[in-house]
Image (tube, rainbow, N blue to C red):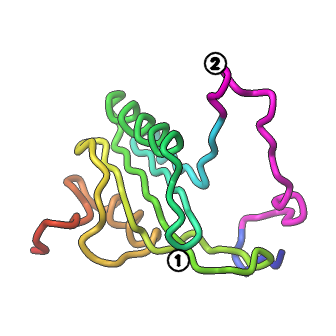
Amino acid sequence: MAVTEGSRIKNPYYAKQLIDFQGLDLDGGLYPTDIDALIEYHDMEYILVEVKYKNKRVPYSQKLAIQRMIEDFTKAGKRAIALVAEHYESDPRKPVIAANCKVRELYYGEECQWRAPAYDLTVRQAVDSFRNSTATPIPLEGTELI
């Protein structure tokens, strides 16, 4: 795997190593999930990011776990958002730059519902918008841009 300039990946060889969750199931079928990115910002905000290839859906149990984490962060008095984004890099040897992925869905703790953004934006743009706003920072599908 080629590492791009500015990457924080220290050892790309080990980054390719799969983590197998076998033996960690609970109740005969509940398995761990993973999250592609978590940003905890100064004990005030949480941003979760899940990236999928093209239009691959987020499995129900993973989406529910992400949703519940956002709600728990919000109940604890933190601002929180989850972003589901997609990439189109078909070559698994090439890195996917998460900041450049297109956000297709988001979940605000204050709203408690999954929504599509009202316009195209990257993960970086969504993070910046969330960080720079105290209200609902990203216009959502079905709302007017002002």
Residue under the point 45% across and 51% down = 47
Q: Position of residue 143 (x, y in %)?
A: 13, 66
- Residues 88 and 56: in front is 56
Q: Secondary structure at mark 2?
A: loop
Q: Which tag, 2 or 1, sits closer to the chain's start?
A: 2
* Direction right: furthest residue: 13
Q: Considering the image in quadrants, where does the C terminus appear?
A: bottom left
Q: Nearer the viewer, residue 84 or 11?
A: 84
Picture disc at residue 115 = none
User: Main structural element of the magenta stretch: helix, strand or loop?
Assistant: loop
Find residue 59 and report its horizontal and vertical position in percent: 53, 49
Can you give x and y, in whole percent of width and height, for residue 122 in the image? 43, 74
- Pick out the residue farthest to the top: 27
- Classify 86 as above or below 112: below
Residue pointed to by mark 2 = 27
Residue 30 occupies which quadrant of the picture? top right
Name the residue type under label 1: Asn
Given residues 73 and 86, the one toward you in this image is: 86
44 horizontally vs 117: left or right? right
Residue 89, position in %: x, y? Answer: 64, 80
Total of numbered circles in the picture?
2
Question: Which quarter of the picture shows residue 77?
Answer: top left
Q: Is residue 77 above or below residue 106?
A: above
Give the left or right position of residue 108, taking residue 17 as reference: left
Find the distance from the CA under tag 2 to the CA under tag 1. 38 Å
* Residue type at numbered disc 2: Asp
Residue stretch in magenta: 8-31
Within 10 Å of disc 2 (Cα), the crowding (few <14, some 14-19, many 20+) is: few
Q: Residue at x 82, y 63 (%)?
A: 10
Which disc is residue 100 wearing?
1
Q: Is residue 121 above or below residue 10?
A: below
